[in-house]
Amino acid sequence: MLDKLIRSILAGISIALGAVIYLLCSNKIVGALFFSVGILLVMEFKLLLYTGYVPTQRESQSFKDYLINSSFVFIGNLIGGALTAALLSLTRLKDQLYQATTAVCEVKLNDSLLSIFILSIFCGIIIAGIVKATNLKHKVLYVAMMIATFILCGYEHVVANSFYFSFSLKLFTFEGLLLMLVCLAGNFVGGLLCSFIKNPEKNDN
């Protein structure tokens, strides 16, 4: 259990680090591509990321355990994102990141919950496509393209949002918590849908 918690927290930290790159990069296309550093860290160290856990672990346990374990992984991810926000708020990046995360969160909070839910489903599908692509030669390029797609399209990733909302202090408001819950549910639905898709035979594409 402790190992699972540590791997979940580290996954949250990894995604937060990717989010920081995106926020600090003046060119949003370049920033979106380099956001993939977070996912690559998760994949390289076999960390536990909520949006990667949901589409891959359904068949290995009862549905009750699946829900419990998915929630546990998310709590670890949330801790990682919030911890990264707290630590970076003690650095010279504080003002720049606060302005950037506040702007990002305002856009999300001014959106409808239905929109957030739908955008979260699409994000869940994209991340599922990444974690299921275990047999690609050019995985780094593939991951970068997929991550850039969800970032530039504005799809909602609940773990990235845990960093944005923690740093901007919007997480500790009713609206922020509600948005996070809707995003959590949308990511779950997208990942769950993809969990029923069987991977084709491995090849060297």
Image (cartoon, rainbow, N blue to C red):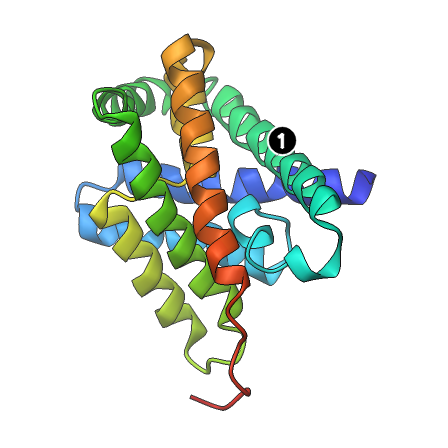
**Is 144 located above or below residue 20 in the figure?**
below
Residue 173 image point, x, y percent: 41, 9
As rendered, which of 11 and 187 lies closer to the eye?
Answer: 187
Q: Is residue 35 left or right of residue 73?
A: left
**Is 59 located above or below residue 154 in the figure?**
below
Residue 75 image point, x, y percent: 62, 31
As rendered, which of 95 and 156 lies closer to the eye?
Answer: 156
| Residue shown at 62% from the left, 42% from the top | 10
Q: Residues within 10 Å of mark 1 (few under 14, many from 20)?
A: some
Residue 103 image point, x, y percent: 22, 23
Q: Quadrant of the N terminus?
A: top right
What residue sits right under mark 1 in the picture? Answer: 75
| Residue shown at 75% from the left, 55% from the top | 61
Q: Identity of the amino acid at label 1? A: Ile
Q: Quadrant of the C terminus?
A: bottom left
Label 1 secondary element: helix
As rendered, which of 190 and 107 lies closer to the eye?
Answer: 190
Number of residue marks = 1
Q: Would residue 81 be visible to someone looking at this image?
A: yes
Residue 185 image point, x, y percent: 47, 36
| Residue shown at 29% from the left, 31% from the top | 114
